[in-house]
């Protein structure tokens, strides 16, 4: 199964904040991160970390790990877009 350009978690988070009528600065303050950090995540310039995932889960009622899973899917997709070396699988010794 091929992944098709999964959304950066910041794109999804922006939709949530829009629906909740929250500003980036206001939400950043609510979860105790800098406005710069939140802006970078929202705009796809920074990754969601485990710490931010836990803060988002507490504020938004998502499960712990939800935002990290979205980030991981994005990271895997981005890695697959890069040229990959030809790595041979190890053969198991008999």
Image: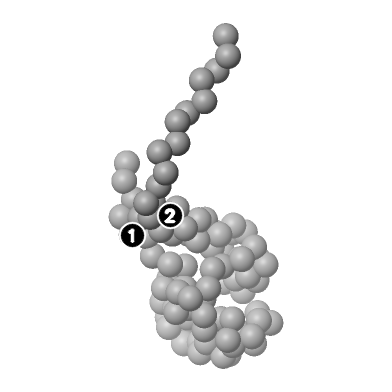
Picture quarter with the N terminus: top left
User: Label 1's element?
Assistant: loop
Indicate the position of residue 80 as horizontal and vertical percent values.
39, 51
> Which residue is labeled 2 in the image?
79
Indicate the position of residue 46 as horizontal and vertical percent values.
53, 73
Residue 5 higher or lower than 28, as above or below: above
Residue 74 higher or lower than 87, as above or below: below
- Neighbourhood count class around disc 1 (C-alpha, 10 Å): few under 14, some 14–19, many 20 upward: few
Q: Is residue 94 visible?
A: yes
Q: Which mark is residue 73?
A: none
Q: Which residue sits at x=56%, y=81%?
A: 38
Farthest residue to the top: give it: 94
Q: Which residue sits at x=52%, y=25%?
A: 90
- Neighbourhood count class around disc 2 (C-alpha, 10 Å): few under 14, some 14–19, many 20 upward: few
Indicate the position of residue 43 as horizontal and vertical percent values.
44, 79
Q: Is residue 57 visible?
A: no
User: Label 2's element?
Assistant: helix
Indicate the position of residue 66 as horizontal and vertical percent values.
54, 59
Report the Cα–Cα distance between label 1 and label 2: 11 Å
**Mark 1 in CB contact with mark 2 (< 8 angstroms):** no
Query: Quick one: 60 or 70, which is closer to the camera?
Result: 70
Indicate the quadrant where residue 26 lies: bottom right
Q: Which residue sits at x=46%, y=87%?
A: 21
**Mark closest to the chain's N terminus, 1 or 2:** 1
> Which residue is labeled 1 in the image?
5
Q: Which residue sits at x=59%, y=81%?
A: 37
Query: Quick one: 45 or 64, which is closer to the camera?
Result: 45
Q: Is residue 70 left or right of residue 93?
A: left
Query: Quick one: 83 or 65, which is closer to the camera?
Result: 83
Mark toward the viewer: 1 or 2 = 2
């Amino acid at each position: 199964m091929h992944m098709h350009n999964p959304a950066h978690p910041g794109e999804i988070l922006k939709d949530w904040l829009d629906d909740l009528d929250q500003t980036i600065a206001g939400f950043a303050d609510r979860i105790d991160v800098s406005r710069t950090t939140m802006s970078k995540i929202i705009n796809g310039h920074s990754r969601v970390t485990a710490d931010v995932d836990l803060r988002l889960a507490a504020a938004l009622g998502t499960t712990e790990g939800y935002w990290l899973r979205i980030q991981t899917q994005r990271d895997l997709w981005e890695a697959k877009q890069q040229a990959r070396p030809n790595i041979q699988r190890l053969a198991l010794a008999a």
